[in-house]
Image (spheres, rainbow, N blue to C red):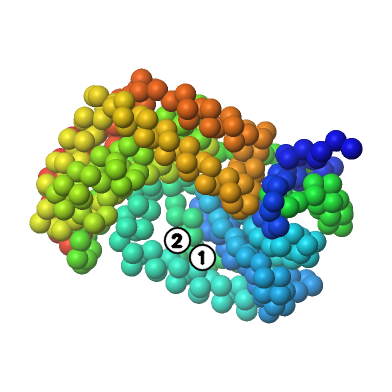
Amino acid sequence: MPPKKAYQCSILPGGPAVVTERMPAVRTVSLGIWIPSGSRHETRAQEGMAHFWEHMAFKGTASRTARQIALELDLLGGLADAYTSREHTCFSIRVAADHLPLAWDILADIALRPCLPPEEMEREKDVILQEIGMVEDTPDDKLLESLWEAAWDDRAMGHPITGPAEGVAAFSEAGLWEWRAANYRPGAMVVAAAGAVDHAALADMIGRFFAGLPPVPAGSPNTAPVPAFRPGSLSLPREVEQTHVAMGFPVPGNADGGRFARAALTTVLGGNMSSRLFQEVREKRGLAYVVSSDLNTLADAGLLEIHAAVDPGRVEELLDVVRRELAAMAAGGVTRQELEHVREHLRGLLLLGAESTENRMVRLAKNHLLFGRHVPLSETAAKIARLSRDEIGQAAAAILDPARAVVGILGPQIEPSWLEGAAS
């Protein structure tokens, strides 16, 4: 008998795509149900509904109370989680391989057959309002959330995933069910699993579960217009000890072929301890404890974000340093040594992630949703190895243009010149 393929994919009739990757010498499985609907697929009145349904998953189903769900998950020794992004909602669990049948039964139950008891619904509204309040009280979270919102002319793209407090408080049972019916369509879902998994057995379990659900019209795929970026600035006066500074530069999305060059650029700029911003801002000048750059990207668009927290009296100095580093990177790209280091860094991150069943499951699902296919680790590693100074330099020149940035500052006293200087 030939050995089983590591990667397998089945498209179930009227149901989801099932994608699995068998990992040798592993005794656990990470399993995820992915719904390609997130905050980006909400109207103004619906803002926060994708996130609300994620919260309600653990509050009971037709066959399990919230306590029964908790007891069964604890009995499995498993790690269950759920999260909402702008593009999708994911329900996941990691368990010992022999617990996979029960894990699937629980995960499918909470993700796809939840109840909406009025008392639980009102209680969860209060929980989410507290979550929104936490962001308001966390300076870096508040600034980066506001920076993202200010960057796009499309409200659906920009609004907070949690939704606004007043909108969440006004959610109705009918409105929530209406949004769910339009967005939780089996034919658009992906079920992904990685680890000690038997593809045929899992696909059979999933097929039997979906066969027992009421039929759902296929509907049209979730789409959203490519948003237009709008440069500008925002100030958020707050009585805090440090002033937080953030910049966002528009970048193409994850489906674009230049994503590895952008990842390399972001890493060299401020993505690790040897990066230019970390060395210049923190190590050489002691200007800030926190300084970093990150990519925040969706399928079709995103931002390269820079964030630092600094003493209010040294904001201008910080901005001068950041401006100089951006100009140097845009004009000169990366050095040969930086190229060698960043290629090894990205390759190391790829291989470290490959050791985790959870990371492999997430990778399977995201690649299927984005590209409709499996992307082998070897393919990604080869693209990283082929990165060149020219490619990264071209990305830097195209992206790091202060005139095309959105700049935000949160702090106790904000000088207008700081915002002008940061974007000039």
Kind of element beneath mark 2: loop
| Quarter of the figure with residue 29 | bottom right
Provide residue 92's location: percent of width, then percent of height.
Answer: 64, 58
At a point 45% along the width and 61% down the height, the residue shown is: 164
Residue 252 lies left or right of residue 360; in this view the side is left
Callout 2: few (<14), some (14-19), or many (20+) C-alpha neighbours within 10 Å?
some
At a point 53% along the width and 71% down the height, the residue shown is: 125
At a point 70% along the width and 47% down the height, the residue shown is: 24
Provide residue 302's location: percent of width, then percent of height.
Answer: 43, 39
Identify the residue under disc 1: 168
Which residue is most to the front? 25
Q: Is residue 211 above or below residue 135?
A: above
Callout 1: few (<14), some (14-19), or many (20+) C-alpha neighbours within 10 Å?
many
At a point 14% along the width and 41% down the height, the residue shown is: 320
Q: Nearer the viewer, residue 417 or 78?
A: 78
Kind of element beneath mark 1: helix
Distance of label 1 from label 2 (alpha carbons): 6 Å
| Quarter of the figure that contains the C terminus | top left
Three-letter amino acid code at disc 2? Pro
Three-letter amino acid code at disc 1? Val
Which residue is most to the right? 1
Q: Nearer the viewer, residue 331 or 400?
A: 331
Q: Is residue 411 above or below residue 355?
A: below
Q: Nearer the viewer, residue 246 or 318?
A: 318
Q: Is residue 118 above or below residue 255?
A: below
Can you tell which mark lies on residue 164?
2
Q: Nearer the viewer, residue 62 or 364?
A: 364
Provide residue 294's location: percent of width, then percent of height.
Answer: 38, 44
Provide residue 51's location: percent of width, then percent of height.
Answer: 56, 59
| Figure label count | 2
Residue 212 lies left or right of residue 133; in this view the side is right
Asked if the residue under mark 2 is in contact with the one under mark 1, i.e. CB atoms within 8 Å, the reply is: yes
